[in-house]
């Protein structure tokens, strides 16, 4: 299923999250799912790992925060750097919802997130978007904002092979067309 999902673009990301937070006819606002998806999109964790988070797993480490997890999918230990703004976002969510530091932040299942996301995506008319689209969005943003450094993205996602990472990164049609245009080197036949 993940191979069928596409990376979100900025507009889709904002529309999905804002629709999830506002709700629509027949769909109540869902801050919990919107928050979980935003964490996935901003630190690149799989949703299966995001929903198992507790606040006390995020440890202050000097001037940054660190999160050690054993990934559910791979069984590998992974260390995440959590930017302070993301930590504050999570901390405020926990305070607002009276979630204790040792309690799971999200008392939902991966399937719950998928079902709620599908309702919003269908409402918005998007196709091929699932929870993994948020991880692919993270990968694409990191790639585009860091001089197209595929090795950086590979490291952040903990992929063993750069080919896997390349499938995550979405290049817009405009980027491809501009690259082709810049590469033209013709010699006139006159």
Image (cartoon, rainbow, N blue to C red):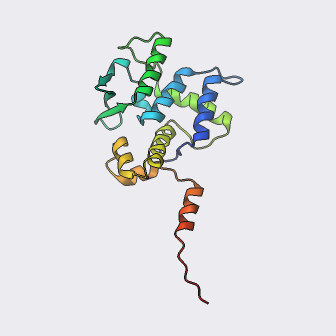
Front in this rendered view, residue 168 or 62:
62
Q: Nearer the viewer, residue 133 or 177?
A: 177
Outermost right residue: 25
- Residue 40 location (% of width, % of height): 46, 33
Q: Is residue 178 above or below residue 65?
A: below
Q: Position of residue 161 (x, y in %)?
A: 33, 52
Q: Can residue 71 be seen at all in this image of the molecule?
A: no
Q: Position of residue 134 (x, y in %)?
A: 50, 37
Please state if 132 lies on the left or on the right of 178 as rendered: left
Left-right relation of 70 to 105: left
Query: Dividing the image into 4 quarters, which one contains the C terminus?
Result: bottom right
* Residue farthest along the bottom direction in this orientation: 190
Q: Position of residue 153 (x, y in %)?
A: 39, 46
Q: Image height check: is 168 above or below 180?
A: above
Q: Nearer the viewer, residue 128 or 64?
A: 64
* Residue visible at 58% across and 62% down in the picture: 177
Residue extending farthest to the front is: 63
Q: Is residue 13 visible?
A: yes
Q: Can you tell which quarter of the image residue 8 is in?
A: top right
- The answer to whether 99 is drawn above or below residue 66 in the figure is above
Q: Is residue 155 above or below residue 22?
A: below
Residue 105 in which image quadrant: top left
Which residue is depicted at the point 31% across and 22% down?
Answer: 59
Residue at coordinates 42% horizontally, 34% vertically from top-left?
Answer: 43
């Amino acid at each position: 299923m993940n191979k069928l999902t596409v990376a979100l673009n900025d507009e889709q990301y904002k529309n999905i999250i804002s629709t999830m937070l506002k709700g629509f006819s027949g769909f109540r606002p869902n801050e919990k799912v919107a928050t979980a998806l935003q964490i996935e999109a901003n630190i690149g964790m799989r949703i299966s790992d995001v929903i198992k988070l507790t606040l006390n797993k995020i440890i202050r480490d000097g001037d940054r925060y660190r999160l050690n997890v054993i990934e559910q999918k791979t069984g590998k230990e992974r260390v995440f750097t959590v930017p302070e703004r993301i930590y504050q976002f999570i901390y405020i969510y926990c305070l607002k919802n009276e979630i204790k530091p040792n309690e799971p932040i999200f008392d939902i299942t991966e399937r719950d997130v998928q079902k709620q996301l599908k309702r919003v995506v269908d409402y918005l008319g998007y196709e091929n978007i699932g929870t993994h689209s948020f991880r692919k969005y993270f990968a694409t943003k990191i790639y585009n904002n860091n001089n197209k450094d595929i090795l950086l993205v590979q490291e952040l996602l903990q992929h063993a092979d750069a080919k896997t990472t390349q499938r995550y990164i979405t290049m817009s049609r405009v980027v491809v067309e501009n690259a082709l245009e810049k590469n033209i080197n013709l010699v006139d036949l006159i």
